[in-house]
Amino acid sequence: MQWRPFLHLDLGTTHVVNTLTSGIRPFLVLTALCAALFLPGLSSVPPTDRDEARFMQATKQMLETGDVVNIRFQAEPRTKKPVGIHWLQYLSVKYVAQGDLAAVWAYRLPSTLAAWLSVLCVFVFGRALFSAHTGLIAAGLTACTFLMTTEAHLAKTDAMLLLTVITAHMALFEFYRAKPGIMPPMKVALLFWCAIGVGLLIKGPITLAILVATAFSLSVADKKITWLR
């Protein structure tokens, strides 16, 4: 009996892999996977997380009062988290759910979309770092994790925070691999600062702190900081 490597691909399998990783097909495949994982239960499962209920109630009161600056939970000010996620939920309920305050799915929709975009970004980032095949596997595994599926169903900050962290690191990578004296396009810098700005509105300095840790680690590993200029 002749043994073959576990990851050996014959010509037929290679053709299938190449087909799945070309053009817009990987984005369609990952979108279908995310839809199958993230959409079921989005409207039928009641709030089960204590923080989710608080986020939803605070956004509901924002919709009822029209005050989009002062966040309140019941009669108490809610100042533990920035206002960003409440604004996104506010827009989702008001315009997507047509103002239906009882539409649980509308409060969760920003998290679901953020989880979906995060999966697509993992593919794009993995393709840039390694290959389209590796990026597709990484993105698929990310979508299938219990934590990602859970966060996609919760009206909280974590899925949106993940999206800001990934997009900021994608931009940081472009600066890291740029040749000396050649700056990446302006859209890369715009993506970088927008990701940090949205991250600040979502969960304070978490995105920025992770970026600083990444930049510091790369500088120590490479023993140079010139790429940060």
Image: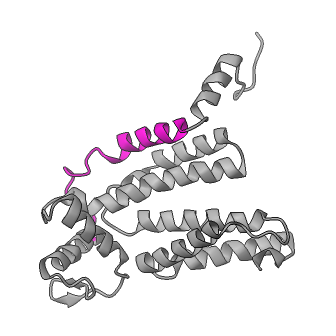
Residue 147 in view in this figure: no
Which is more toward the observer, 185 or 71?
Answer: 185
Q: Is residue 115 above or below residue 186?
A: above
Residue 186 in view in this figure: yes
Which residue corresponds to the image point at 49% horizontal and 56% vertical from the top-left?
118
Q: Residue 69: x, y in percent?
A: 28, 87
Which residue corresponds to the image point at 70% horizontal and 24% vertical from the top-left?
9
Which is more toward the observer, 49 or 210?
Answer: 210
Q: Residue 226: x, y in percent?
A: 83, 77
Colour scheme of the rendered structure: one colour
In the rendered structure, which segment of residues is drawn in magenta?
Answer: 24-50
Examine the image and state in which quarter residue 60 appears: bottom left
In the drawing, does residue 42 fall left or right of residue 146? left
Residue ranking furthest to the front: 186
Per the image, is 135 magenta?
A: no
In the drawing, does residue 201 fall left or right of residue 45? right
For the image, the number of numbered tags is 0
Q: Residue 22: x, y in percent?
A: 61, 35
Examine the image and state in which quarter residue 80 appears: bottom left
Which residue corresponds to the image point at 15% horizontal and 88% vertical from the top-left?
75
Per the image, is 49 magenta?
A: yes
Which is more toward the observer, 15 or 222?
Answer: 15
Q: Quadrant of the N terminus?
A: top right
Q: Quadrant of the C terminus?
A: bottom right
Which residue corresponds to the image point at 59% horizontal and 41% vertical from the top-left?
136
